Image (spheres, rainbow, N blue to C red):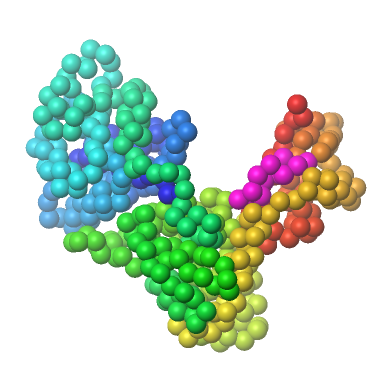
């Protein structure tokens, strides 16, 4: 299910980044009294009560022709176009400025729900100063203080009320949903076309629920699939993608709605830093993953070259040792037949359940081979284990003291579970719990 997107916008130096950091609970955005410090959009996930959404911090909307100001304006425009709800921040100490009025015009044209937040209202006596902001035409202004965290609860209540309605289900819910993500120009569109144009595929294109993705339902070997294409769409009206960060928000949206994520890497350029960031988003979301090395036809593609490239991937992505790697060429269709079986395998393992009795046999055998550690004279005792969830498979291990479960021993148990039950293509979680 797609998470809603909220953008924080406003002119420079009204406290947008301070409020962003308050909402996400950590200092992600750089905070500085100098206008224009936040030049690019910053993304993070926020949870309010039972609702999780993606939050975008933007650079201030500055009018002018200087190259930096133009880029900041483009970034803010992109964020506005991506958002489901916009938080418009103004400075309560300054009153309404000409720049606020210009931002207001931009937001009117967006036709998006806007919640007006009057920042720097640090004490109750200042609340009377907010009434002039009604004239901006966005309804009730919400007095807040980013520096002190005041009024943010009421603000978030209103933001969540404005999220698009949904029934909590995906279209074609019974089908296996998988997305294709990666940095620009790695061949995502070609890969989607190669998958959909095989002779065994029945294709029906349906516009997706997100504005930048196309959901394509199809049938492969008698199974229903929906592929979520995040490629292309570099231009929206007069707005052009000006930094690589735009692709990250696309990836976040697609990942949320996927069972399996295909991470596409360009064999001709190798692994770069942006690949690592995109891979990290998919891993953090706890999704099943298949790594696709595309453009394999452009390099020397013998078995030795394949082994070397796989070793490089494993070295860069140590946390993805469970992910299968597929080498192919979407353009020539070389080895394309090896992809879909890995997608199906990853999906099956993502939903796999293990019987409690068999699981405990594996855990006890593992402890017999490698006894539990002792910390400060106290030994960890594993009492029993059970699987508590799927997507991803999650195991609760009940122990005498969860603090004694060191990361290394948790990893050891994970490896033994994988040896016994497979789980190729999917992460698994092990939760240490105190009995009772």
Asked whether 238 or 39 is in front, the reply is 238
In this picture, is 403 found above or below 293?
Answer: above
Indicate whether residue 307 is drawn in magenta.
no
Q: Which residues are magenta?
A: 385-396
Residue at position x 80%, y 57% from top?
420
Q: Is residue 232 visible?
A: yes
Magenta: predominant secondary structure element? strand
Q: Count the numbered circles shown.
A: 0
Percent position of residue 407, x then y: 71, 44
Residue at position x 51%, y 65% from top?
225
Asked whether 214 or 117 is in front, the reply is 214
Q: Please, which residue is most extreme toward the left here?
A: 98
With 58 as the anchor, is 320 left or right in this view?
Answer: right
In this picture, is 34 found above or below 279?
Answer: above
Percent position of residue 171, x then y: 44, 55
Q: Is residue 62 visible?
A: no
In this picture, is 390 found above or below 213?
Answer: above
Residue at position x 21%, y 26% from top?
140
Q: Please, which residue is most extreme toward the right here?
A: 368
Q: In which quadrant of the rendered image does the C terminus lie?
A: top right
Residue at position x 58%, y 85% from top?
301
Asked whether 31 or 274 is in front, the reply is 274
With 91 as the anchor, is 381 left or right in this view?
Answer: right
Q: Please, which residue is most extreme toward the top here?
A: 125
Indicate whether residue 394 is drawn in magenta.
yes
With 207 as the anchor, is 391 left or right in this view?
Answer: right
Percent position of residue 220, x then y: 54, 72
In this picture, is 194 found above or below 342?
Answer: below
Percent position of residue 413, x then y: 77, 49
């Amino acid at each position: 299910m797609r998470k809603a997107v909220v953008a924080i916008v406003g002119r420079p130096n009204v406290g947008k980044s301070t409020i962003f950091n308050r909402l996400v609970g950590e200092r992600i955005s750089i905070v500085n009294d100098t206008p224009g410090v936040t030049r690019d959009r910053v993304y993070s996930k926020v949870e309010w009560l039972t609702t999780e959404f993606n939050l975008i911090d933007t650079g201030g909307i500055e009018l002018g022709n200087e190259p930096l100001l133009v880029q900041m304006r483009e970034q803010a425009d992109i964020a506005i176009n991506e958002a489901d709800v916009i938080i418009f921040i103004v400075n309560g100490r300054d009153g309404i400025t000409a720049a606020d009025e210009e931002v207001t015009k931009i937001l009117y044209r967006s036709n998006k729900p806007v919640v007006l937040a009057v920042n720097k209202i640090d004490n109750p006596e200042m609340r009377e100063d907010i009434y002039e902001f009604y004239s901006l035409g966005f309804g009730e202004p919400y007095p807040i203080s980013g520096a002190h965290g005041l009024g943010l609860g009421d603000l978030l209540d209103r933001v969540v009320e404005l999220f698009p309605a949904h029934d909590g289900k995906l279209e074609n819910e019974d089908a296996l949903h998988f997305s294709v993500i990666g940095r620009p120009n790695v061949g995502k569109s070609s890969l989607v076309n190669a998958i959909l144009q095989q002779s065994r595929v029945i294709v029906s294109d349906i516009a997706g629920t997100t504005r930048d993705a196309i959901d394509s339902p199809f049938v492969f070997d008698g199974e229903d699939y929906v592929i979520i294409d995040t490629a292309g769409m570099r231009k929206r009206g007069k707005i052009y993608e000006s930094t690589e960060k735009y692709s990250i928000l696309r990836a976040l949206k697609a990942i949320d709605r996927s069972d399996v994520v295909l991470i596409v890497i360009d064999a001709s350029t190798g692994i770069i830093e942006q690949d690592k960031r995109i891979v990290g988003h998919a891993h953090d979301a706890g999704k099943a993953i298949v790594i696709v090395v595309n453009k394999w036809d452009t390099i020397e593609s013998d078995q030795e070259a394949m082994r070397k490239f796989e070793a490089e991937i494993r070295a860069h992505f140590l946390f993805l040792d469970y992910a299968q790697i597929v080498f192919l060429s979407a353009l020539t269709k070389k080895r394309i037949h090896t992809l879909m079986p890995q997608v199906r395998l990853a999906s099956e393992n993502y939903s796999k359940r293990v019987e409690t009795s068999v699981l405990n046999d594996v855990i006890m055998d593992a402890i017999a081979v490698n006894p539990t550690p002792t910390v400060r004279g106290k030994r960890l005792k594993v009492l029993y284990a059970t699987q508590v969830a799927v997507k991803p498979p999650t195991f609760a291990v009940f122990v005498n003291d969860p603090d004694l479960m060191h990361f290394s021993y948790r990893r050891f148990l994970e490896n033994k579970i994988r040896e016994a039950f497979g789980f190729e293509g999917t992460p698994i979680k092990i939760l240490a719990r105190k009995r009772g």
